[in-house]
Amino acid sequence: MDNNDISVQAAIAAGCDPAQAENLAGAFAAVLRDRCAALDTVAIPGFGSFSAEKTDEHVAIDSATGQRTLFPPAINMHFTPGSMLRKHLSHE
């Protein structure tokens, strides 16, 4: 299933056209990105929660070559499924 198929299926489920479904998905992604960039948690009842974790910049050394590499700071997102989602996925 590719991005277009997902848009069509979401549009059918929501009762709207694929362009509207794609706009809603883009808006949701923008909100999620902004909130997680601020290190907030976004919880969707029945679905799950998205949280962000910031890692500081650090230096890692390759054990084989001894080369040192500087990794920049990063914000990593984590998804924790809600109980209803876990229940639905385990029964199907």
Image (spheres, rainbow, N blue to C red):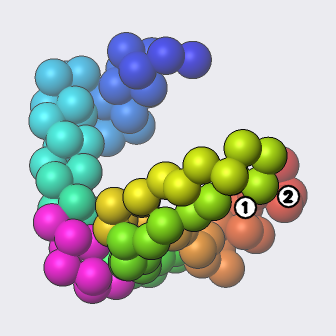
Badge 1: how crowded within 10 Å, few (<14), some, or many (20+)? Answer: few
Left of 24 or right of it: where is 2?
A: right
- Magenta segment: does it hold 36? yes
Badge 2: how crowded within 10 Å, few (<14), some, or many (20+)? Answer: few
Q: Residue furthest front?
A: 66
| Label 2 to label 1: alpha-carbon separation | 5 Å
Name the residue located 33 percent from the left edge and 61 percent from the top edge.
72
**Which residue bears the numbered disc 2?**
91
- Decide: is 90 above or below 44: above
Q: Which residues are magenta?
A: 34-41
Name the residue located 49 percent from the left edge and 16 percent from the top edge.
2
- Magenta segment: does it hold 83? no
Left of 33 or right of it: where is 44?
A: right
Percent from the top left, x then y, of residue 45? 44, 80
Q: Are the residues tagged 2 and 1 within 8 Å (C-beta)?
A: yes
What kind of residue is marked 1? His
**Which residue bears the numbered disc 1?**
88
The secondary element bearing badge 2 is classed as helix
Name the residue located 27 percent from the left edge and 84 percent from the top edge.
40
Quadrant placement of the N terminus? top right
Name the residue located 22 percent from the left edge and 60 percent from the top edge.
33
Res. 52 visible in picture? no
Percent from the top left, x then y, of residue 19? 16, 23
Q: Which mark is residue 78?
A: none
Percent from the top left, x then y, of residue 86? 72, 68
Tell me which corner region of the image, top left, top right, bottom left or bottom right, holds residue 76: bottom left
